[in-house]
Amino acid sequence: MDARARGRIGRVDLRRIARFAGLACLPVLVWLSWIPRDWEVRTGAAGQIEHFVAYAGAAGLIGLGFHRLPAWRLGLALGILAGLLEIGQLWVPGRTAQVVDFAASAGGALAGLAAARALDLAGRAVAGRRVAAGQGA
């Protein structure tokens, strides 16, 4: 197998892993959003930072795994999910819905998607330079 084929296979495998890992994050976000306050284990960071990091990580993986889908669609879907999960907290014992938490979640999703697209563009640029130099992809 030549270097170009190995490079393509490696990228496909990483994208598949990112896709499954990103999708696996979604039920975790639901679980963490809708468990009662008594069950929570916090990191010690501000709640909004926890929201931002959780959504940035999930969105980054989803953005890498679903690189062919428009980022605005992924961002919209994650934003809607963040809103629904925040509203759903109104019915969870000890939890409250806050606009600032929604904003942190949605902002994290946008940051994660932006990072995924930047990594994707950087990877394409490196691959393009390799092809132009005759080194394969």
Image (spheres, rainbow, N blue to C red):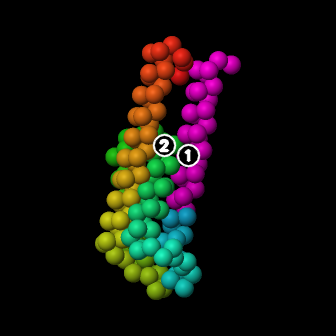
Name the residue type under label 2.
Leu
Q: Secondary structure at mark 1?
A: helix
Asked if the stretch drawn in magenta spans residue 100, the answer is no
- Estimate the x, y position of residue 89 in percent, counting from the top left: 43, 77
Please tell me in which quadrant of the rendered image residue 82 appears. Answer: bottom left
Task: Compare residues 42 and 106 and report the one nearer the observer.
Answer: 42
Task: Compare residues 54 and 87 and report the one nearer the observer.
Answer: 54
Q: Are marks 2 and 1 in contact (CB under 8 Å)?
A: yes
- Estimate the x, y position of residue 137 in percent, counting from the top left: 53, 22
Q: Secondary structure at mark 2?
A: helix
Please tell me in which quadrant of the rendered image residue 10 appears. Answer: top right
Kindly tell me whether residue 78 is visible in this rendering. Answer: no
- Circle 2 residues within 10 Å: few <14, some 14–19, many ≥20: many
Q: Residue furthest top?
A: 134
**Residue, x 51% and y 67% (percent of image)?**
30
Relative to 103, 126 lies left or right: right
Kindly tell me whether residue 123 is visible in this rendering. Answer: yes
Question: Closer to the N terminus: mark 2 or mark 1?
Answer: 1
- Estimate the x, y position of residue 127 in percent, counting from the top left: 48, 25
Task: Compare residues 73 and 56 and report the one nearer the observer.
Answer: 56
Q: Main secondary structure of the magenta part?
A: helix
- Circle 1 residues within 10 Å: few <14, some 14–19, many ≥20: many
Q: How many marks?
A: 2
Q: Which mark is residue 18?
A: 1
Q: Which residue is mark 2?
A: 64
Q: Over which residues does the magenta segment extend?
A: 1-27
Name the residue type under label 1.
Ala
Task: Compare residues 105 and 34 and report the one nearer the observer.
Answer: 105
**Residue, x 59% and y 27% (percent of image)?**
7
Mark-to-mark CA distance, 2 and 1: 6 Å
- Estimate the x, y position of residue 99 in percent, counting from the top left: 31, 72
